[in-house]
Image (cartoon, rainbow, N blue to C red):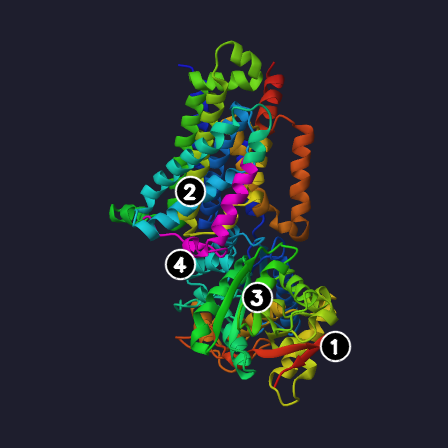
Amino acid sequence: MRLSSKQATLLVLAVLILVSPAFFPSNYYYRVGAMVFVNAIAVVGIAILTGYAGQISLGHAGFVGIGGYACALMPLHFGVPPLLAVVLGATLSGVIAWLVGRPILRLKGYYLAVASLGFGVLVAMVLANEGQVTGGPDGIKVPDPGARAWLTGLGLELSNAQFWYVFTGLFLLAGAWLALNLNDSATGRALRALHGSEVAARTVGVDVARAKLMAFVISAVYASVAGSLLALQNRLITPDVAGYMHSIELVTMAVLGGAGSVLGAILGAALLTLLPQVLTVLQDYEHVVLGLVMMAVMIFLPAGLLPSAQRFMRGRGE
Amino acid sequence: MKRIAAGVLALGLMATTASADIKIGAIVAETGPASALGDPEAKTIRMMVDALNAKGGIKGEKVRLVLYDDGADPSKAKTFATRLVEDDEVVAMVGGTTSGSSMAILAVAEEAKVPFISLAGAIEIIDPVKPYVFKTPHTDRMACLKIFADMKARGLTKVGLISGTDGFGASMRVQCLAVAKASGIEIVADETYGPKDADMTPQLINMRNTPGIQAILNSGFGQGPATITRNHQQIGLTLPLYQSHGVASNAFIELAGAKTAEGVRLPGTALLVGELLSPDDPQKPVVLAYKASFEAAAGAPVSTFGGYAHDAMRILIDAMGRASSSKPAALRDAIEATSGLVGTTGTYSYSPTDHLGLDLSAFRILEIRDGGWKLVN
């Protein structure tokens, strides 16, 4: 039996997540792995919005912030269990994305980029300034979801870092699976059609505004879940996760890896999460090299890392 | 794809090397939004480790420093803290420039049972006391108490508070509001401004129009306090102006202008006024020695924040000398037993119930006079 490209992608991802720990000498590598997965979840969402639907959001960190603070504030103020707060935060993010996106996505052009930029800044400001509720600029503690203790009770001993590696890895697999299925669905085809040409898509009967709105809402949910996982793992959340710089970082990860593909998005997230850790040996030149790598990728591999690599392999195979 | 991942992992492995020396870790915000604090901290820590090794290290063993820059991002700070305890296997950590980063690091330190001396202000870091967590900067609450005591002595009891909405300003505002009443101070106005605002005249005019107001206190950090000092003079306010310990540096006088800042009072550490201290002050030799060596090594004037790092390193080096072994648990016990250690910020005496180790005498009320500092009292 020949694997479809969807099954192959998921298999590669699952094997990578499973096999990598064999090379991990310490808990630190699990922690870095978990950070890669958390970022990758948000970036897969960006891939759906930017890669599939061709829209750019410069405020996605706002949804990361909503998801993260949902896990801190809902348990604190309403006694909601932290894992339920992940779901509620994602729902809230989806609803807000729908409200923000509905009027804007009827328009053609780059309005979403501008509006989302404003939205992200607004979320970060509210989180920093409403100190009585949100804990202010120094951040707020996040309760332990208790899942690790539950596993220990079942006889499965995992260190904190190992647990989060597995937990976020499962979320990433699920997220990738959903994104790949979406790509193969009618909505996915509609999104790719409107990415190619909005006018052409409209002529063949695609409800362009609705398809774009759907992509925006879905990607907001991805960002929100990533934020929740970040907060639960760090046991602390600060307003800068919702900041402008974090939004840009997420878009950069998606574009660097190759915005059109799920695996590319994950690769981009992995690269930009791992590079700062690897480059610490360079001390003062860390940021210079990081910038140079990003520029080099965009100049020489404008389609992003993974699509360019695939084209290269295919070219050699012939 | 797999090959790339393996390559990246291999690179990561190469970054860590084994060594028999005593290893200590540091995580500071050398770059990013808090670099004004983190940069002198990093320079101080490197300088002191070099000086220690030049003198032969601890009991004949060299000390190796592993320093990471978290860019004031708590999530990165947590990753680096994990790296320090798991991979670099350090025996103690210093750093956490911002309160957020410190909170992220201390969770790792507590779990791994590795002592951590924080350089951030928030009271939550050491309250409640955590066995492995210590800190060197005084808390915002102490700054508020010191300022209010000075106001009270001048007969100023009705005070207008204006605070930045950044971490520093917001935290100090909460603490000042909490201790005002007990200090006999009534807060009659409570204004805020964004850390990047270019003009605070409206807030100051609001305050001028508040009945009974006798003084203004600005809890803020960065350029905001300089703007407020200028606005305060521009609209001809005669109410005494107090700034926070966050701007206790010569850079503030330059930024606000010497003439404009004339008469502004703030709580500062002995570091700023080393030459003015009386000769029998125990802090005088410590402060002058640090100032001379830092300015020679870094080519920049000392700041309070570098002083926090200096004190943390002094405490750590002192504890390493006294500890029965260089194991983290033994070090922790030795740090907790620190008593009467004179630093640039104050004199530290830790105990099982006090991991801050400073009292109000660590702060000195300073007044800006003719473009320089003058000790009050």
**Quadrant of the rendered image containing residue B7:** top right
The subunit letter for the residue under badge 2 reads: A
The subunit letter for the residue under badge 4 reads: B
Judging by the rendered image, the residue that carries numbered circle 3 is B209
Range of magenta residues: A116-145
Judging by the rendered image, the residue that carries numbered circle 4 is B111
In percent of width and height, residue B270 lies at: 62, 78
Between marks 1 and 2, how big is the CA–CA gap? Answer: 52 Å
Between marks 4 and 2, how big is the CA–CA gap? Answer: 26 Å
In percent of width and height, residue A212 lies at: 49, 24
Q: Is residue B232 left or right of residue B152?
A: right
Residue B126 shows in the view: yes
Quick one: label 1 or label 4, which is nearer the N terminus?
4
Within the magenta stretch, is there residue A135?
A: yes
* Main secondary structure of the magenta stretch: helix
Q: Do the residues labelled 4 and 2 touch (CB within 8 Å)?
A: no
What's the amino acid at mark 2? Answer: Gly
Give the number of the disc on residue B342: none
